[in-house]
Structure formats: C-alpha cells, structure tokens
Image: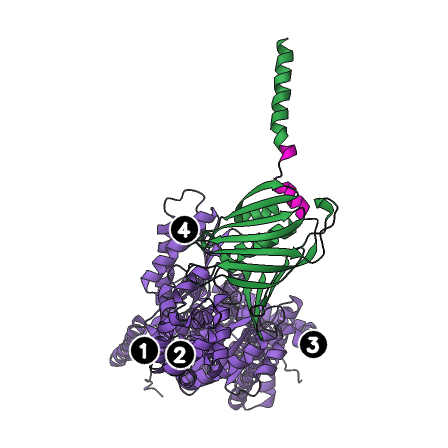
Amino acid sequence: MSLAQAGGPPGWSRRIVVLLAWLLVVALGAVVIARTQIGADLSAFLPKSPDLRQRVLIEQLQSGVASRTLMLGFEGGSVEQRAEVSRAVGKAMRESKLFDLVQNGDVSDWSEAGTWVFEHRYQLSSGVMPGQFTAEGLRDAIIDTLSMLGTPAGNAIKPLLDRDPTGETQRVAMELVPASAPRSEGGVWMSRDAPRALMIATTRAAGGDLDAQAVAIARVQAAYEAAAHGMGEAVPKLLLSGPPVFSVMSREKIKTEAIHLAVVGGIVMSVLLLLAFASPRALVIAFLPVATGVVVGTASVSLVFGSVHGLTLGFGSTLIGETVDYAIYYLIQARGAAVAGTGWQRWREVHWPTVRLGLLTSVCGFAALVFSGFPGLAQLGVFSIAGLVSAALATRYVLPVLAPDGATGMGMRRHMARLAGLLVRGLPRLRWPLAALGVAALALVLWQGGHLWRADLSAMSPVPRSAQQLDEMLRKDIGASDGGVLVVAFGDDEQAALRHTEAAAARLDALVDKGELSGYEAVTRVLPSVAAQTARQASLPDADTLRANLAEATKGLPLPASRLGPFVADVEAARKQAPVQRADLMGGPLGSVVNTLMYERPGGGWSTLVVLHPGPGFEQGRLEEALAGLPEVQVVDVGRELGGLYQRYLHEAFVQVLLGALAVVVLLGVYLRSWRRLLAVCQPLLFAVVLTLGGMALAQAALGILHLVGLLLIVAVGSNYALFFDQLRTTGRADEDTLASLMLANLTTVVSFGLIAISDIPALSSIGRVVAPGALLALLLSAAFARNVAPGKGPSPQRPR
Amino acid sequence: MRLDLLCRVVVLAVAFCAAPAWAAFDLPELMGLLSKQKSGEARFTEQRFVHGLEGPLDASGTLSFEAPDKLVRRTLSPRIETMAVDGNTLTLSRGNRNRTLALDSMPELLGLVEAMRGTLTGDGTTLQRYFKSTVTGVANQWTLDLVPNDSRLAAQVRSMRITGRGGEVLGLEMEFVGGDRSVMNISPNSPPSAVPAGASRRATP
C-alpha cells in the first residue's frame, strides 16, 4: 500500500510529495467552494419522484406560483393612511418590474386590461355561440345589457352600448371577478376583522432564486419605508409573509446557525484537544484532517449537486466532531514507539485497519442518506462520506509526515484514562440491569408502534411558529386559496393544456350552477384554446344576417338597431381576427394572470392551475366525481398528498435504513469472520438504538424520517466503539491511553451532535437529538457488554458465554 | 328676582331645544319603527331614465327580506333574474347560471345593498357607516335621503331617496352621476294595517 521504510520517520521526498498532493486537493476544494452558491430551498426536504399528483404538488411548491407569492399587510393607523400606504407600495412594486402580479384591490389601472378584453371579446366570451346571434338570442342579450343601465354599473356599460350591445365584455369581466375576495374599503383591500390593508404579489423571479427573492423583498420594504415616511407615530406597520419570505429568512437563519455551530464546535473541540494534549502543535495537527474533510466534503457536494444547501453546512459541525476522532486516535496511538520516528508505522499496522473499518461502516450509514429520496439528505450523505474519507486519508498519509510519533503531551489524559478505566471496570457489572432496561425500552417502543412515528413534513420546516401564524392570518384575510385543493390540467403542448382546462371548466361550471362551488379561476378566461376561439368566431354571422336579425331583435326596445352600426362592424372584424396566443398576452396587462395560472412543466409539456373558491356547499368528493373521466385533469388535495408523500417516504426510509444497517453488519461480519465477535459488536449497537428510541418515546417526542436517519448514524458511528472493544479483547488488554483516546473521540462526537441537537433548525436538531445520546450509549454499552478489557489488571480468565 | 328670571329663561331654552324632538322625526326613531319588522314581501315596479335611450326602461318583480341580513330582488319582467344577498354573499342568477360574489369586495354593490338592507332592518349604524343620512317628514310620511361615503360608490351614485309610511318602505329613488335616474315603487303584499305606524306590518322594498 505504501512504501513503508525500515524505520524512522518518512523520507523527505515522500514528505514533500504527500504535502504537495494534500495542499493541491485542499486548494482545489477551496476554489470549488469559492464559486459555490449556498441555497436554502425548503423543498430540498421534499422527496422527489412521487406519483403524478404528488409531482404536480412538488412542482407547484418548488417553482409554481405558490413559491413566488408574497402576502403583505399594513396594520394600524387610519383607514386613509392604510389605503394610502397600500396604494403607494403597490405602485412602487408595479413600477419595479420585479413582480408579475400586484393586487391590493386598487382597480384604478385596470383600464388597459379592460381595453384588451373589449378588443378580443368575441374570442374570449363564453357567451359567443350560434344561438346568441339569432333574433331571439340578440333580443335577450340586449335586454340583459339594458338591465344594467340605470344602476351603479350603468356608467361603465353605457359607452360600450353601441359596439357591444350583447354585453360580451361585461361577461368576460364578470368571470374575472373572483368569487371570494377581500373586503374593499377606501379603494383597497382590507381585512374583515382587523385594521389591516392587504396586498398579494407574485415575484417575477423563480421561487428557488433566493438572491432575486431577497432583492424583491428588500424592494417591498424600501417602498413601504418611502410610503410610510412622515406619517408620524400611528403609521401602519408592514407585515410580510409568504414562501419567498420564509425561504430567504430560512437561508439567513441557516447560514447564521451554520457559522454559529461551526464556531462553537471548533472552540469546544479545541478546548477538549488542549485538555487532552496540552500542546498547541497537537491541536493544529488534529485540525488538519478536520479542515480537509470540511473542504473536500463541501466541494464534493458543490460538484455533485451544483449548489450547497445551508443545512449541509449546519451539519458540517458534526463532521468536525467525527473527523477529529481520526486525528485523536492517531496522535495517541502512534505514541510510545520503541524507536523514535516509527510510531506511525506501528499505528498503520495495528490500528489503521480498525479505523478503516470504522470509516467503512460510517460510509455505509451515510450511503443510505445518499440514496434516500430527499435531495437535502442526499447532500448530507455525500458531504459526510467525502468528508470522512478525505479526513481519514489525510490522517493516514499527512499526519505521519507531520507527527511521526503522535503527540507528546499528556495533558489531562491521565485523569480521562482513570475515569475510562473505572467505567470499563464498573460497567460490565451493570450488564444485566442495562439489558433489562433495553428489553423494557423495546417493549415500550413496540407498544407505542406507529404512534411514535407521528411527525409530519411540517416538523422539518425551519419556519418559526410565529411566522407561520402571521402567514395563516394574512392568508385568511386575503382568502387566498391556501392550496387546500387544487385542480391541475396537463397537456403535451400549450393548446392541449388549454383544451383540457376548458373541459375541466365546463364541468366546474355545472358545480357552480348547482351551488356546490362558489367559483374558480382558470387561465382560459383570458386565453382560450385556439379551438374554442375559432369555434366562437365561426358562430359570428356575416354583416347582412346580423343586420336583419338586429332589426327584428330591437323591435319595441329603447335601443334602435340604427345605432348599432359599430356593433355590426366589430363583429365583422372579429370574424377575421387572428386567435389570441400566449405570447400576445405576455407583455400586456393580463400577462401576470397567464404567468400565475399556466406554466411549462420541468419534464416537458404544459400545465394550468385552476384555483378553486370552494364556498359553503363544497364537497371534495363531488368535485372529484365531476372531474372523473378527464385523465389530463387532476384534483390535488395538498394536505392529503403531502401526508401521503410523507408516509410513503417514511416507509421507504425504513427500508433504506434497514439496508444501511444490514450493510454495516455484513461489512463487520466480513471483517470479523466470527459469528460470536459479530454478535458481540452488534449487541451494544442494538441496545443503544433501542434505548435511544425508548428515551424518545418516554419524552413523548414525535419521531420522523430524520430521527430514523439518526438511528442509522448511531449504528454507523457506534460501530467504531464496539470495534475498538472487540480489538481490545483480541489483543487481550487495553492500555489507558487507548481507552482515553476512545473516550475523547466519543466526547467530540457527542458534543458535535449535541450542538446540533439544540439548534433551532428542526432538520438538524432531530438528527442531533438521536445521535448525541445514541453515540454516548453506544460507547457505554460497548464497555458494558465487553469483557476482559479492563486496563492494568492483565488478562483475566475468560468466561464462556 | 334675578334667580326667578334665570329659571324661566332656562326652562324656555330647554323647551325650545326639546320642541323639535317632539315634533320632528329623526333617524333613530325611523330606525325604531323599521326594526320592528323582521321579514316581509312586496312587489315592485321600476322605471329607469337613461340618457341616450328612447324611452324609459321598465322592470317589475318582487322583493323579499328577512332579518337580519337576507334580501332577495327577483325581477320577473322583462327577463327573469334574481339577486340574492345572504350575509356577505351575493348570488346573481340568470337562466340556469349562478354567480357568487363577496359583497364587501365590491363597494358599489355593498352600498346599494346596505341602503336597502339597512333601511329594512332599521340598522341605523350601518346606514350611517356608508351614507350621510337625512330624515325629513313625519312618521306617517317620511323621507330618508342618503349620500354615499365610499369613494367608489360615490363615483357612480349621487344620492338615494327612500320614502315610506310608518314601518313600511314604499319607494326608492336613485340618482346617478351623469344624470341617469331610477325610480322604484314598492307595494307591500299585505295591506298596511290601520294601526299607527309602529305596529303596522312593514313591507320590504
């Protein structure tokens, strides 16, 4: 494997080669990291590749309108102040071009959209059908339009009378008014139950583009500052919520937390190492594998995934705790060589195989993460595997160059060793009580069964409860469909998607007429399929027919046919109008509607979103019944699908974790080549897992996928300790320093996972809370179930099992 | 002596101030009369005078009302259509089609509905929230003039005048910005009782 020399420290040429190679790797890693984007996309913890509905849902959550929607509130002050701030902020946001859609109830600049609808009314209006232009149809339609005159709506309709006596513009406009909308006061949206003006906006930037989202949010805040300037003390205050806010906030939080954890972890490790070695030189050397691991791990994630999730960095502190173990083992175990400068050779022969096996079992554990369905967890897996392997290699090749005989200082290790000795001697006496405790814990865990695994996806969300409450409040005010139930239509191309949307809309219309649905919003109201537009145009009569029908239709009405020349001309022109296409709408006033309700699917094809306004008579069963038989239309119940998604992944995670654990066991078996030794190694691990689970059950913690992952890490990390005791048993006895190194290594692991256990980020704390106690238990139980390894007493008679 | 004079002046002043309260009819009193009626039905005829049309637009139908917040206007001629208000939900029906809207999201509609609903239920607080109101006349023949507060409604409706007798609403006139007008005559389904206003069964406008 290496060009081991007969004796003494490694030769100079070898030293230079090793150091240069190492520096090159670290430098390359640093370069990669410098060009890496740090992400904090919440959906990294949503599983991928689920079934159709779940995929739709995840598309929506990741890049759909849901991920781009901001909700704003202006709370306090007087009605006039709120309205003024809302209008000013709305105006600034519209002018910034950072937003697609800005709605605050202000209808003052709808005229552009109105003009566009008016010009395309014979393509857009659902009223345009053959019967509409017979004498009878015209008469009914004209009477309906006249019935709007002499009402508050009259002034809006009167100017259009001569050109649109059948009221097609009005029909389209009415359809565009949502069935449920916030209260309007002072010309803007206001909450129904609090002094709060409301606004909803969608960012132009994609939900995943957090830098752009942060810019958009900053723009909102600046607009608010400008609008609120000089309003005195009663100024309405800005409330801001929505997924972009959550994502940006989470990223900041995760970044801060990651740095925090790394700093605290680094300090605690340093203190531990200084106590153990009493040598700054040993401290620096011990951190070399750690730094190598962190750099290579981060760079690998960046290379594999294109960006590094903030959580991955947060997890980095545990890598510090684990990789420092390699250095600790080396620095202690390479000591005491008979010939100066040969300690590293003895370490390679005696201890490296065990360290290597421990590394491999850890890699097995983390490999389960790589293959899990969660992109976020896969990152943690790649990060840890690359980090551990590179740190172990750095220990194996670089440390002998720098410290051929390990570390010289003794520090507090003597005390540690004494304590370790006490534990190792004392713990086996507790073997039976511990075993009984384990059995009791197992009984408790089995008794609680599925109830123990009751955490859901929201348990992973790093969004604090207060922010979630604000979000819920604004959502309720705005009546924004909280994504409870969505209808999504698909198609291979735009037109197919639009045709399928129209088919769904026809069924939904029937529900609306029966009062089982208040209303819905569909993109086809402003962008019908070309087929629908052509059919409408085909139902427009030629000028002569229309004139003749009009003459009959207007008999006895106060609107004479002679006034309707412009109508005849418009209908004639509309017969030849080119169909409205998506591109025609994009730059215009209704482009935001299209952008909101229609999107190109990541995997190809198009999709439209039908937003429902359920109303009191709504039943999901009736909706599903109504839409049955339309395979390209899916009803997505967000809560149900998310729940289903999670259950499915919890199940898959169980399988993966079992496979991961199995891989660890197989690996151990191959190495140990003895059923008895394998059993002895696995026994403490099994008990550590069961006791940890029992503790969680006692604490009434709701367990989820991340806890499950934590259990696997107990096995992966804990196997290192069990293996050491196995090794100690085969070599007959343990010197105090080896025990001290084991204890120190365990301490750093427990501390690093303990640090993430108290983190505010649920994804991290779930893992930390399982692994920190689990790793400690793994060591203690390894000691308790091991025999004949007590130091300083020589081999004692072996008791057969 | 001086004290005596002072007392007489004060009594006179009080009497003078109180006098209009006895003779005049004010909003709280009108609301008191109106609020005794919990439900009602009526027929209506409506004429709308719209500039630019040859002749007025006629319509007729029924109105019904049920406290606290239900109101239905059913037009039978020239075309059947229904506008039903229940709380904050407005349902427009024409033919087989129904359309539901949140009333308070459209101040123009809300103002109109509250003018009628507020008057019918005798809800003075709501009326004063949306309108500047003036009551003239006496209990047996009163007029309630409403001018909208909300800018969106005020941009369309200049004023409204509701007339009635005792607890009954008998007429609703609207004048729109631009000069169009609408005049609605309301006749309660059951004949007004001979008992003075307060006890009479009020019809809905």
- Report the front residue among A197 and B28: B28
Image: magenta residue range: B21-35
Q: Residues within 10 Å of mark 4 (few under 14, many from 20)?
A: some
Horizontally, residue A551 falls left or right of residue A9, namely right
State the residue in front, A650 or A677.
Answer: A650
The dot on residue A9 is 1
Determine whether the residue tagged by mark 2 lies in a helix, strand or loop: helix
Q: Residues within 10 Å of mark 1 (few under 14, many from 20)?
A: many
Labels 2 and 1 positioned on one and the same chain: yes
Is disc 2 in contact with disc 1, using a CB cutoff of under 8 Å? no
Amino acid type, label 2: Arg
The relative height of residue A416 versus residue B1 in the rendered view (above or below) is: below
Outermost residue, top side: B1
Q: Colour of chain A?
A: purple
Name the residue beneath numbered marker 4. A84
Residue behind mark 3: A439
Name the spot of residue A483 as percent of width and height, x first. 52, 71
Q: Earlier in the sequence, mark 4 or mark 2?
A: 4
Q: What residue sits 58% from the left and 45% below the top?
A: B143
Task: Report how far apart the C-alphas of labels 4 and 2 lie in the structure.
Answer: 50 Å
Mark closer to the chain start, 3 or 2: 3
Give the CA distance from mark 2 to mark 1.
107 Å
* Chain the render paints green: B
C-alpha span from label 3 to label 1: 51 Å
How far across and down, in percent of the image, does residue A365 sit? 50, 81
Q: Tell me where residue A116 sits by quadrant.
A: bottom left
Do we see residue A580 in this rendering? no
